[in-house]
Image: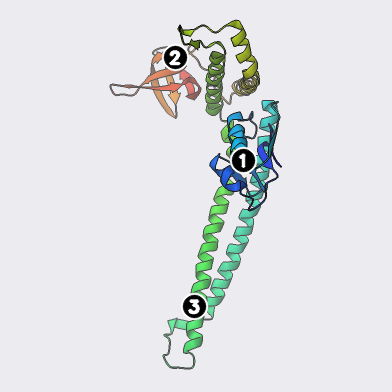
Amino acid sequence: MLTITHSHAAGTMIDGTSKGDGTAEILKTVGWRWGRSISAWFVPQSRDRLPKIHTITRTREALEAAGFEVETDIDHEHRTTAEVEAGKIGRQADRVDALAAKADRKATAEDAAWTRAQSALDRLPEGGEPIKIGHHSESRHRNAITKADNAMRKSVEASTDATHAQARADASTHTTDARYRPVTVANRIDTLGAELRKLERRVIAPRYDDAQGYIDATTTQKQARADHLAPNLAEKRDQIAYWEAVRAAQIESGTATGYDRSTVKKGDRVKIRGQWREVVRANPKTVSVSTGYTWTDTAPYAEIQQHQRPE
């Protein structure tokens, strides 16, 4: 018996598979991946999200068509965004520690490989003495050159591995900061708002009638849609509330600027991406600025770093 499970914290996974039972080929075709670190099949990008019912349904149908018995255990509840973010930050901190430890191991291996390479080079005859063909030392000399060459190659490979590991460790330390950059947070709020409005439009969208074409949905139909989309709507609203609170805290602390159409006017000067520009037009969500050419550039208000009124 195979069991497809989903929870907001763990994502979508499947229990009961075994190597060589034929499930791997089926799961791959419907978008599943094998997780080596968890030794289990999972649906990518399903953690911290509501279940992808269409993927679960396709998987179940494909497995049952192949003769497997499948049951599902789907949890439609979602954690708060605060809990989700705390989990992400914690996992990222663990990843930083793991990558830092790996970088240290690679650096140690690099030092050891370099020492072995130098030792192998030291065993070669001094002064670059050529191989004496036919001499009793020929075989020993050739072996020493081969060992020195192999040792140097391994040293170079170890150095490359150490550099790559250190780069990954350094990059991982900035992941959480990047997620909470003021401009990123502002853009995320806009994106979530658009996604929420799309869901709300689905609730009140017209329905198609064969005789009359598109007509207004009935109250009953709208309520049914609202009930069906309730988990998605609740999750999206919670996400918006969380990130708006983050944005407000950033503005209050001075980490982010809170400019908008009410504070930026035509003729003002604004600093965007390190350059001062004159405001040509203040749009609802963006500001149009001069470029010195015949066209203008636009940027979201969140990217305004400083603002000056004309003297």
> Can you say whether 33 is above or below 241 in the image?
below
**Label 2 vs label 3: CA separation?**
73 Å
Classify 10 Å Cα crowding around label 2: few (below 14), some (14-19), many (20 and above): few
SS for tag 2?
loop
Which of the two discs, 3 and 1, labels the residue nearer the N terminus?
1
Here the colouring is rainbow
Q: Nearer the viewer, mark 3 or mark 1?
A: 1
Q: Label 3, on which residue?
A: 146
- Residue 178, percent across and down? 56, 35
Which residue is located at x 67 percent, y 50 percent?
18
Q: Label 1, on which residue?
A: 63
Which residue is located at x 63 percent, y 18 percent?
228
Q: Label 2, on which residue?
A: 309
- Residue 19, percent across and down? 65, 52
Residue 235 quadrant: top right
**Amino acid type of disc 1?**
Leu
Classify 10 Å Cα crowding around label 1: few (below 14), some (14-19), many (20 and above): some
Classify 10 Å Cα crowding around label 3: few (below 14), some (14-19), many (20 and above): few
> Can you say whether 299 is above or below 140 in the image?
above
Q: Is residue 125 visible?
A: no
SS for tag 1?
helix
Which residue is located at x 42 percent, y 15 percent?
268
**Amino acid type of disc 3?**
Thr
Please name whichever residue, 292 or 232, is drawn nearer the observer in this view of the structure.
232
- Residue 150, percent across and down? 51, 72
**Label 2 vs label 1: CA separation?**
66 Å
- Residue 87, percent across and down? 69, 35
Residue 243 quadrant: top right
Is there CB contact under 8 Å for labels 2 and 1? no
Q: Nearer the viewer, mark 2 or mark 3?
A: 3
Which of the two discs, 2 and 3, labels the residue nearer the N terminus?
3
**Amino acid type of disc 2?**
Arg
